[in-house]
């Protein structure tokens, strides 16, 4: 048994082409094969092309007739905070009754309440809660995940979160990149005065990052650089230390204002600058020139009732854009990247083809995964979606409807 599977008569969105991030109008080029066929073998794609060009004499174990339905790369979620303890449903209720997200945070709730709940869990409990969310995300079509720490804020819990993220990545058909986000919030114990705050940042530099690097627990380093979180100066220090340890940067930037985060992302050549609700033409140009991928998180805008990032202006100005869930216990517990893709169109004004590139290839590039996923080309992972339609725009048109017929990861069906 060769384990060779053939998918026939499909509209295949291959996104084939350069492994570089697609910028501006190139985001709309999905390299579609009408009446296409794809062969998978041993968890990888073995062949893609026109059905009429299928090589003869192939021994196939399993043939799937798609009858014109769409096949596209599985989703890559390039910004999640997937590993946390407990929930913040009550905080959602408070916000719906009029409370403000930033005010809750400043008063010691928000991120800090998830910190308390995460610190309280041992590694197995944290794994179990996180794996349940990951399973739902896979059913929604995501097979590759970036996962941040940042609900520990102390050495022990940060390491525990990252170990759990690594363990999730050992599961069959799950690809994980990890990000150390210890500079996510100033914890309760460091809020007394400026000295305590400075000592917290010093500890990130002197203890947390070196320990994370020693155990090779983080592929990236992130900082919440914004009002109420970390200043540009503090962020620069954290990222510089991470760079010394060989950990490349990505950033939470410009969510609450023109706080300097986007410009810093350009200055340090971050893989990605995320949120970007407030971004002017000069900041867009800085990101474009530095080759920083702009990551939109429109689920967060919806949940917090904030403005949507201007994705249209970003693409029109030639930026490479990615779209992600931001899946976290507070500002956006959404797990369905297909729904967030639709929000990126209706809210951030991306075109459907641009949004599809943003949740597949461009997201993979931002995680340094473009050599293995995000496109359907021979040699890449057999991670793909079968849609229950012959027009992928239905993902946007019927936003949130169950158009995922089947999800494949490493050549195997993801249980629904
Ligand atoms: O990306 N903006 C900062 N951090 C998260 C929110 C985390 C939380 O509320 O728990 C975000 O939105
Ligand atoms: Fe986030």
Image: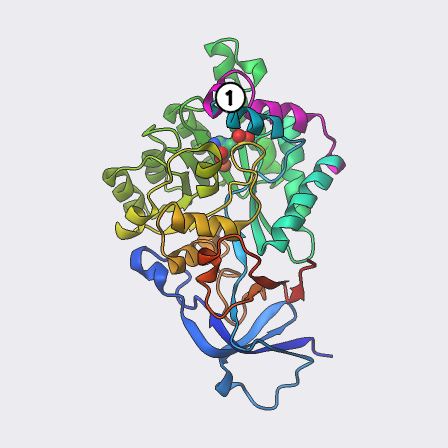
Mark 1, residues whose alpha carbon is within 10 Å: few (<14), some, or many (≥20)? some
x and y percentages locating residue 330 in the rendered image:
55, 31
> In the picture, residue 110 is in which quadrant?
top right
> Which residue is identified by label 1?
105
Please say whether residue 80 is visible from this viewpoint: yes
Q: Which of 117 and 87 lies nearest the eye of the viewer? A: 87
- Determine whether, in the image, residue 325 is placed left or right of residue 313: right
In the image, is the residue at mark 1 within 8 Å of ligand 1 by its beta carbon?
Answer: yes
Vertical position of residue 199 compared to residue 239: above or below: above
x 38%, y 24%: residue: 233
Q: Which of 388 and 309 lies nearest the eye of the viewer? A: 388
Q: Which of 259 and 269 lies nearest the eye of the viewer? A: 259
x and y percentages locating residue 325 in the rendered image:
51, 44
Q: In the rendered structure, does residue 372 fall within the stretch colored magenta?
A: no
Bounds of the magenta segment: 101-124
Q: Secondary structure at mark 1?
A: helix
Secondary structure mainly formed by the magenta segment = helix
Q: In the rendered structure, does residue 113 fall within the stretch colored magenta?
A: yes
x and y percentages locating residue 26 in the rendered image:
33, 61
Q: Residue furthest bottom?
A: 57
- Determine whether, in the image, residue 62 is placed left or right of residue 213: right
Q: Quadrant of the N terminus?
A: bottom right
x and y percentages locating residue 86 in the rendered image:
67, 31
Please say whether residue 154 is visible from this viewpoint: no
């Amino acid at each position: 048994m060769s384990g060779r599977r053939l998918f026939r008569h499909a509209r295949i969105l291959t996104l084939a082409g350069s492994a570089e991030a697609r910028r501006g109008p190139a985001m709309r080029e999905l390299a579609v094969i009408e009446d296409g066929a794809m062969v998978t073998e041993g968890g990888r794609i073995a062949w893609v092309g026109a059905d009429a060009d299928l090589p003869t004499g192939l021994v196939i174990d399993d043939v799937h007739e798609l009858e014109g339905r769409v096949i596209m790369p599985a989703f890559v979620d390039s910004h999640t905070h997937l590993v946390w303890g407990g929930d913040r449903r009550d905080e959602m209720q408070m916000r719906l009754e009029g409370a403000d997200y930033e005010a809750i945070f400043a008063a010691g709730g928000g991120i800090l309440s998830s910190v308390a709940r995460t610190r309280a869990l041992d590694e197995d409990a944290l794994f179990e809660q996180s794996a349940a969310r990951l399973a739902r995300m896979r059913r929604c079509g995501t097979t590759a995940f970036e996962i941040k720490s940042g609900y520990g804020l102390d050495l022990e819990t940060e390491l525990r979160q990252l170990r759990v993220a690594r363990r999730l990545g050992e599961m069959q058909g799950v690809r994980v990149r990890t990000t150390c986000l210890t500079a996510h919030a100033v914890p309760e114990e460091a809020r007394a005065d400026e000295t305590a705050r400075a000592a917290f940042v010093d500890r990130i530099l002197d203890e947390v990052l070196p320990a994370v690097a020693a155990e090779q627990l983080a592929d990236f380093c992130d900082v919440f650089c914004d009002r109420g979180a970390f200043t540009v100066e503090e962020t620069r220090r954290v990222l510089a230390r991470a760079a010394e340890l060989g950990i490349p940067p990505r950033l939470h930037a410009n969510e609450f204002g023109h706080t300097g985060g986007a410009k810093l992302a350009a200055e340090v050549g971050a893989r990605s600058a995320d949120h970007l609700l407030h971004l002017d033409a000069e900041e867009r140009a800085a990101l474009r020139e530095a080759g920083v991928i702009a990551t939109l998180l429109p689920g967060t805008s919806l949940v917090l009732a904030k403005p949507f990032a201007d994705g249209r202006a970003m693409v029109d100005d030639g930026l490479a854009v990615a779209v992600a869930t931001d899946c976290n216990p507070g500002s956006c517990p959404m797990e369905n990247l297909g729904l967030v893709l639709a929000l990126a169109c209706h809210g951030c004004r991306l075109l459907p083809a641009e949004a599809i590139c943003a949740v597949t290839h461009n997201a993979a590039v931002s995680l340094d995964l473009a050599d293995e996923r995000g496109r359907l080309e021979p040699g890449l992972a057999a991670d793909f979606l079968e849609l229950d339609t012959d027009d992928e725009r239905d993902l946007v048109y019927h936003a949130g409807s169950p158009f995922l017929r089947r999800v494949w990861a490493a050549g195997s069906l993801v249980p629904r």
